[in-house]
Every structure is written in C-alpha cells, then in structure tokens.
Amino acid sequence: QVQLVESGGGSVQAGGSLRLSCAVSGSLFSAACMSWFRQAPGKEREGVATIEQGGSATYADSVKGRFTISRDNARNTLLLQMNSLKPEDTATYYCARRLIRRAGCPINDRSAYTYWGQGTQVTVSS
C-alpha cells in the first residue's frame, strides 16, 4: 500500500526559506512521477512542481527560480526547497504520486495523481 507523509511546513517571514519532505512508502518509488500541489484557503488546488522518473523537473510560473523539486530514490523521499518565499505562497502543500504505468508527469492535473499525502501548512508573513 502506498502512503505519503509530508513534513517541514511552518511559519516564516517573507524572503525566508523552508524545505518540505514527503516520505513515500511502498515499492517502485523511483519509477513514479511525483508532484507537489498547494491549496490556499478559498482557492483551487494547484500544481507547484513535478519531477519525472529520470529527474526532469517542471515548475509553475509562480515559483520558477525560487523552488526546487528533487527526489532521493534511495530513501523514497520527495523534497521541495522553497526560497525567497512570498505571502502568496501561503497554503497547504501536498505531495502526490502518479500510477506507475501512466505516461507523462502533468503539473496541474489533480485527476492524474492517485496517491496523496495529508498536507503540511506553510505560512509566509509579510
């Protein structure tokens, strides 16, 4: 059974940094497309970044140049380094995993991901 557990959220001032982690149980982590989504109060859940099996990453325009997604296949862990944080980055952040046999790694399609974590809160104050 696949389980995802996020950690690393917290409160930070604008311009600060946070590093989110997502521990993934179950086999074949290295063969799965992984993504980070976020959802602010009253808004739709949106894709933040994806990383393909081979390590290629895609970012939402709003976070390009500030966020870095990476994966540690030896530890079954997905990471998101967030720098130069802004108040508009305030949201609950979720990691998600796509089914192994699905082609592609879409950045902003919630329906493409089967497994989700419970979320971790990030709050950025001005």
Image: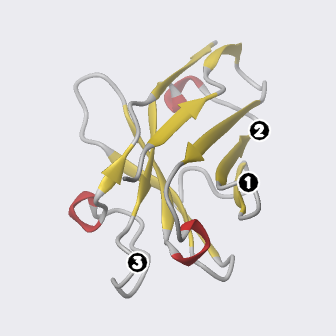
Q: Residue beneath label 3, please? A: 100
Residue located at (66% from left, 51% from top): 77
Residue 118, picture quadrant: top left
Disc 3: CA contacts within 10 A as few (<14), some (14-19) or many (>=20): few
Q: Amino acid at mark 1?
A: Arg
Q: Nearer the viewer, mark 1 or mark 2?
A: 1
For the point 50% across and 29% down, the residue is 88
Task: Please report whichever mark, 1 or 2, sits nearer to the chain's N-terminal start.
Answer: 1
Closer to the chain start, of discs 3 and 2, is 2
Left or right of 48, for residue 74: right
Task: State if disc 2 and disc 3 touch (CB < 8 Å).
Answer: no
* Residue type marked 2: Asn
For disc 2, the neighbor class at 10 Å (few under 14, some 14 to 19, many from 20) is some
Query: Image quarter for residue 112?
Result: bottom left
Q: How is the image coloured?
A: secondary structure
Q: Nearer the viewer, residue 35 or 5?
A: 5
Three-letter code, disc 3: Ile
Element at label 2: loop
Residue for badge 2: 83
Given residues 3 and 111, the one toward you in this image is: 3
User: Could you say where residue 9 lies in the image, as x and y percent from the top left?
Assistant: 61, 23
Q: Residues within 10 Å of mark 1 (few under 14, many from 20)?
A: few
Judge whether 23 appears above or below 48 on screen: above
Residue 11 is situated, as x and y percent measured from the top left of the image, at 64, 12
Label 1, label 2: how far apart the Cα atoms are? 23 Å
Query: What's the residue at 22%, 25% (across, down)?
Result: 42
Q: Secondary structure at mark 1?
A: loop
Q: Which residue is labeled 1 in the image?
A: 75
Residue 40 as seen in the image, left or right of residue 4: left
